[in-house]
Image (spheres, helix red, strand yellow):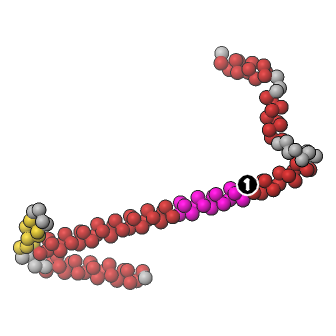
Amino acid sequence: MTALGLFLVLLAVLVLLALVLGGDRAPAVLDLGLFDVDTTTMGIFLIGAATVLVFAAGLELLRSGLRRGHERRKELKHARAVVAKQDQRRDSEQPARAERQGETATGSDPVVERRTAHEHQDPGADEGDDSRRRT
């Protein structure tokens, strides 16, 4: 594929050089409906070549944008699958961990218990630290 692409690019360059160096310089009129453009046959060829170039660049930008969007969606799907697997693993390990720690089937959460125990400790101690920082 690379060799064929290189061959076609070289062929296009050779044809362009042949047309530019030996092309017909006869006057021509390009009718665009609302107005006419006076040019040469070479000018019409170059306008066509520029149009094809702009079209090819637009297709390449569209292709790369679609590819980037597809890769981003693929990465997001993978990340969601990893998070779901981690959540599932954590959920399946929680009852086993609770049984090892001797908790009842009511299922008190040790993280919540630590937070509430910390909140019920001496609240004045934390406030004193904050007041020292403010001064």
Residue lying at 38% horizontally and 64% vertically, measured from the top left: 61
**Farthest residue in the front direction?**
106
Rendering quarter of residue 114: top right
Helix, strand or loop at disc 1? helix
Measured as percent of width and height from the top left, residue 40 is found at 9, 72
Location of residue 117 with respect to 73 vertically, above or below: above
Residue wearing tag 1: 87
Residue lying at 34% horizontally and 83% vertically, measured from the top left: 7
**Is 128 positioned to the left or the right of 110 in the image?**
left
**Is 36 positioned to the left or the right of 14 in the image?**
left
Location of residue 47 with respect to 11 vertically, above or below: above
Rendering quarter of residue 63: bottom left
Residue interval drawn in magenta: 71-86
Residue lying at 85% horizontally and 45% vertically, measured from the top left: 107
Given residues 133 and 10, the one toward you in this image is 133
**Is 58 positioned to the left or the right of 74 in the image?**
left
Given residues 63 and 25, the one toward you in this image is 63
Whether residue 73 appears in magenta in the rendering, the answer is yes
Q: Is residue 120 visible?
A: yes
Identify the image quadrant of the C terminus: top right
**Farthest residue in the top direction?**
135
Given residues 44 and 30, the one toward you in this image is 30
Q: Is residue 39 visible?
A: no
Rendering quarter of residue 74: bottom right
**Farthest residue in the left direction?**
27
Location of residue 102 with respect to 33 vertically, above or below: above
